[in-house]
């Protein structure tokens, strides 16, 4: 059994920073790409930022220049910081993990954490 648990989020004011963390546990042998996607009301789920085992990152244009993403030493966790938050960053943020379980890689999603940017 595999668990992907995200943490962080909540209500923040415009201009503040936010840190999200995600950890995979259970019958996980290894991980490939991990990161975060988000879904705002009435919109499709979209990429926020990801990082692969080699440290290569991918991110949405909307957060370029104001984010940092890193992996934990165990390679089963990922941490995202977004700076200078804007109201349009408001969404449910989902952890994404490509994990090697049962002899193959499969994508797992966390339960989602609400981020609200408002004064």
Image (cartoon, rainbow, N blue to C red):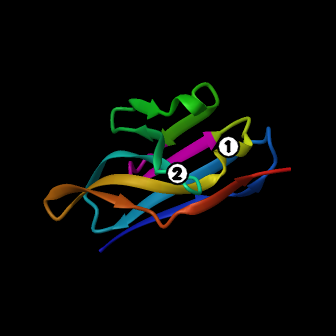
**Residue at image point 57% right, 34% down:** 68
115 sits to left or right of 26: right
Q: Please, which residue is most extreme toward the top here?
A: 65
Q: Residue pushed farthest bottom?
A: 1
- Total labels: the figure holds 2
Give the residue furthest to the right: 119
Instruction: Report if residue 74 lies within the magenta region.
Output: yes
Circle 1 packing at 10 Å, graded few (<14), some (14-19), many (20+), is few
Which residue: 53% across, 28% down? Answer: 61
Measured as percent of width and height from the top left, residue 3 is found at 39, 69
Q: What stretch is highlighted in magenta?
A: 71-81
Does residue 119 sit above or below 83 in this rendering?
below
**Residue 102 at x, y percent in the picture:** 16, 65
User: Does residue 10 lie above or below 84 as drawn?
Assistant: below
Question: Quick one: 12 or 42, which is closer to the camera?
Answer: 42
Alpha-carbon span between mark 1 and mark 2: 12 Å
The answer to whether residue 108 shows anywhere in this view is: yes
Secondary structure beneath label 1: helix
Lower sequence index among marks 1 and 2:
2
Q: Which residue is drawn at 46% across and 59% down?
A: 23
Query: Is residue 110 shown in magenta?
Result: no
Residue placed under numbered mark 1 in the picture: 88
Dot 2 corresponds to which residue?
A: 43
Query: Is 20 situated above or below 64?
Result: below
- Residue at 28% x, 62% y is 28
Q: Quadrant of residue 104?
A: bottom left
Of labels 1 and 2, the one closer to you:
2
């Amino acid at each position: 059994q595999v668990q992907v648990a995200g943490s962080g989020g909540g209500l923040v004011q415009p201009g503040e920073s936010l840190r999200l963390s995600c950890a995979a546990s259970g019958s996980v042998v290894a991980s490939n790409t991990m990161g975060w996607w988000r879904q705002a009301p009435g919109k499709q789920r979209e990429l926020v930022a990801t990082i692969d085992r080699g440290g290569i990152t991918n991110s949405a244009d909307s957060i370029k220049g104001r984010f940092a993403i890193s992996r934990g030493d165990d390679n089963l966790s990922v941490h995202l910081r977004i700076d200078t938050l804007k109201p349009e960053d408001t969404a449910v943020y989902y952890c994404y993990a490509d994990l090697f379980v049962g002899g193959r890689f499969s994508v797992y999603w966390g339960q989602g954490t609400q981020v609200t940017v408002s004064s």
